[in-house]
Image (cartoon, rainbow, N blue to C red):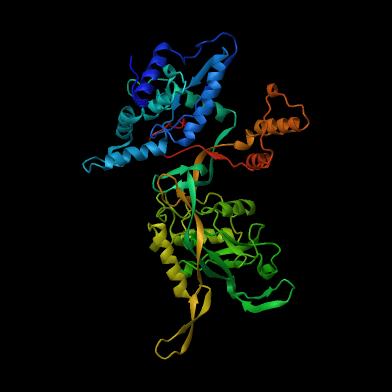
Amino acid sequence: MTMDKTFNAAEAEARIAALWEERGAFKAGANASRDASFSVMIPPPNVTGSLHMGHAFNNTLQDILVRWHRMRGFDTLWQPGQDHAGIATQMVVERELAKDKSNATRREMGREAFTRKIWEWKAQSGGTIIGQLQRLGCSLDWSRNAFTMSGAPGAPAGEEGNFHDAVIKVFVDLYNKGYIYRGQRLVNWDPHFETAISDLEVENTEVAGHMWHFKYPLANGATYEYVERDEDGRVTKRETRNYISIATTRPETMLGDGAVAVHPSDERYKPIVGMLCEIPVGPKEHRRLIPIITDEYPDPSFGSGAVKITGAHDFNDYAVAKRNNIPLYNLMDTKARMRADGLSYEESAQIAGAIARGEREAGDVSQINLVPEELRGLDRYDARKAVVEAINAEGLAVTYLKKSIDPETKAEDLTREPLVEDKPIMQPFGDRSKVVIEPFLTWQWFVDTSKIVGPALDAVRKGCAAERDGTFDPQAGYTRILPESGEKVYYHWLENIEPWCISRQLWWGHQIPVW
């Protein structure tokens, strides 16, 4: 037998993998010579894609552990599987359909027909990752390969299994134990896919932005002495004001403001805390008043030190609103257009005003639509432009003196211009849709993570303590974090964990068993 001059990896990998598969070398129980068992569930890669360096790294580590236990005679199982990847798969199939203009869109064909298209695509293209793992030599028991949508209603022949039933069972069990609940909270909302997404699916990117400065007039023409001081307490500015100024990067959300907040220590605004001020946008005859409150969130050294609180459209504002019982007024629909449903603007403004004055309880405010009729249905950015133009036209923008020189006469001219700062801002984008994510108040299903982090915290606290005093026992079920500097990060993350949104508004995926 002559040796080939060059090594043909493609031929060798396929031949060796087929031989291993034929001999059942990686099946559960192969080479078992003791009662002890060892199993690993592969973190299932997405069915849509192909392996990347992260997969190669973590699968190599798993393979080392699995082979080591198998060679020592453990009853060993490395369970393979693929994730149905709701958003990514739906996006891929929609793109494939769009390549042929004769195809109906997802919404035109309906959910049942669309999911059939996805199953067809999965049958044609879903094996890429399996083939890559096999060529890498990963010692998974391929006779047990699973798919997270196997056994789902409408699954075609060859996609039998119990994953669908298992997901439903676990959901119901966790719900009955109080770990899962339905609630209304602020979530990351993708206006392109019209679904909630997780923090991990959001890419925060620095982009060129603007900071607009506006005046919120005090109710009933009230005035106060506004005084600024330097670090030594000397007065650097004193003037009588009939407004409080705020700065915002998102003027369109001003329509949903529930309050203006200042820091309790900010002496500049103490005379007006508890007073009402006017949101400087919307029909003048129905202009809405909101309270000026104190909260630890505003930074007195940043901007004017006063911040508008729009609890339904900003995560920090949401926390302030919840602490201070400020109503959450939703302004947008699922496509990030200004709402066109609910009560008229006049009726909405009257009810919201009564709530702000303490004349009625907030209760359910979902029907209150504080978008003026002329802005309803507009895209959020078109609404932003309209809001800025209206405020400028009314003279309620904070202004500055702009000096210009006539190029012919060289004469100086001073004019007052609206104060708009050009500045970089961090903006959230959907990692797949690439559109700007909107903080959105909606009903979703959540895992009450605060109820499940206790054992994880205890395991590390006890493990790290035992490591330091020299009594660590790997059989005790404790965990060490190395290097020790990682402990603080771990504790901070789990001790401040937020409820985890687990529901999505997608057609491809498990349906929540709420019937």
For the point 39% across and 58% down, the residue is 376
Q: Is residue 123 left or right of residue 100?
A: right
Q: Looking at the image, can residue 155 be seen?
A: no
Q: Residue furthest left?
A: 102
Q: Is residue 129 above or below residue 285?
A: above
Q: Is residue 281 above or below residue 175?
A: below
Relative depth, front residue between 154 and 143: 143
Quadrant assignment, res 48: top left
Q: Is residue 455 left or right of residue 405?
A: right
Q: Looking at the image, can residue 335 be seen?
A: yes
**x and y percent of residue 150 in the render?**
40, 24
Relative depth, front residue between 443 and 166: 166
Q: Is residue 454 above or below residue 397?
A: above
For the point 44% across and 55% down, the residue is 343
For the point 39% across and 47% down, the residue is 192
Q: Is residue 465 left or right of residue 174?
A: right
Quadrant assignment, res 270: bottom right
Quadrant assignment, res 390: bottom left
Relative depth, front residue between 498 and 432: 432
The N terminus, quarter of image:
top left
For the point 64% across and 65% down, the residue is 301
Relative depth, front residue between 336 and 78: 78
**x and y percent of residue 349 in the render?**
49, 61
The C terminus, quarter of image:
top left
Q: Is residue 109 left or right of residue 268?
A: left
